[in-house]
Amino acid sequence: MITVVDAGTGNLRSVQKALQFVAPGQDVLVSADVADIRGAERIVLPGQGAINTWMRALDDRSLAGAINHALDNLPVLGICLGLQALFAESEEGGGVQCLGRMAGRVRHFDAITHGAQSAHGGAHKIPHMGWNTVHQKQPHPVWDGIDDAERFYFVHSYFVESDNSQDVVGTTDYGETFTSAVARDNVFATQFHPEKSAEAGLTLLKNFCSWNP
Amino acid sequence: MTLAKRIIPCLDVDAGRVVKGVKFVDIIDAGDPVEAARRYNAQGADELTFLDITASSDERDTMVRVVEEVASEVFIPLTVGGGIREVGDVRRMLNAGADKVSINTAAVARPELVREACDQYGSQAIVVAVDAKRFGDGWQVYTHGGRTETGLDAVAWAKKMADYGAGEILLTSMDRDGTKDGFDLGLTRAVSDAVSIPVIASGGVGTLDHLADGVIEGHADAVLAASIFHFGQHTIAEAKTHMQSRGIEVRV
């Protein structure tokens, strides 16, 4: 069973449908139930919207313990806020404490794209929305069959700044270079949305579903 | 390489059927939106936009089923617009599998709706559609499919919607829509340069050069077109090759 953790924000149907598509033999559950998180073989931690709402929802639903347990023991795929939440803190909404599993912080794009010009005039738009390239910084089983510099679909206004280069498995350029994928032990997390990234995204999800760290 | 400019085919759907027709070489049912979505995905479309033009409200559930079916097998961003009146309508479409919901008339009637929808679902899920017509030195916003004048200045309105939290503007020139004369580039550039969020140019595409012009001269982040793709005049792949030849970064 794969459990997609439901913190009550954003749209998790896309994630569920994509997982069902690549792993037709497995149960894919969208749940906010501690038992479903503890009983899963794999965890997907998606999230959209504001991280303070998302972190608060984890608290309200008493999910932090079960999620930390999963992060210690199970293959976990973080997507978008699910990547940002792994870090110590986010500057969103005046400062939010996150799960603190990885060293670094979450910052707003204004910080790096300020004044930078995009290719056809005008400033870089925020949110960073659309298909951008992901440069693979380290080999990883979840990258199997995916070309270096493949394009994935992004939509976000905040990005992570990792203090530990060993955690960084993917980077992307938007004004400057930022961390678009991290991995450590049993955890892999992406800023982009594999569930919306056509063939490349489905390959990534399929790799995750058969990954045995 | 950095962020690619997006090409978005738009499908008008009436009671669960694509209207204006879609002509693919070996398509079985040209009116089936799921079939059309599948083909555009295979051609490399960056996103899909469905516009529900169903007049009767009892047919609304049909669109939900279309979105559910498309989202089960096409894994690129899906935007659904048309008939979104309240936060509950947004929720219904997102739950069906849409990634973004486009709001037009209801945003003009009650701008707070945009703020509420963004607070609930995040800016990334909310697109504000702006239908504009040239008026004096500027452009005015129209609603109800271009029939109702609002007196709002299009550029000021787009900025306001960005301030209210909209994640993106879908900008249609009512003067150019259906003409095949190309985007209203002045309008596109005025709005795109005025807001910090992405702008999708729409209305008037008749040639592949029009798509490229929208990006190069209009400063659009994405270009939307219907008929040049529907009638088999061009594929998405041809459009991308052409844009690339004019120096635009695209996803191939």
Image: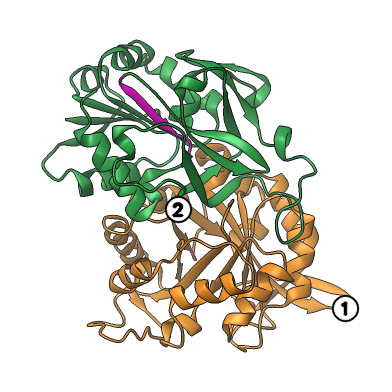
Picture colour for chain B: orange
Q: Quadrant of residue B109?
A: bottom right
> Residue lying farthest left?
A25
Element type at mark 2: helix
Provide the major secondary structure of the magenta segment: strand
| Chain containing the residue with disc 2 | B
Q: In this view, which residue lies farthest toward the right?
A: B137
Seen at 32% across and 56% down, the residue is: B71
Q: Position of residue B128 (x, y in %)?
A: 61, 57
Image position, residue B68 (x, y; %): 30, 57
Q: Nearer the viewer, residue B60 or B119?
A: B119
User: Which comes sooner in the sequence, label 2 or label 1?
Assistant: 2
Vertical relation: A200 (above or below) A61: below
Which class describes the residues within 10 Å of circle 2: few (<14), some (14-19), or many (20+)?
A: some
Chain A representation colour: green
Chain at tag 1: B
Judged from the image, the secondary structure of the residue bearing numbered disc 1 is: loop
**Magenta stretch bounds:** A186-191
Residue under label 1, please give it: B136
Mark 2–mark 1 distance (CA, rounded to whole Å):
36 Å
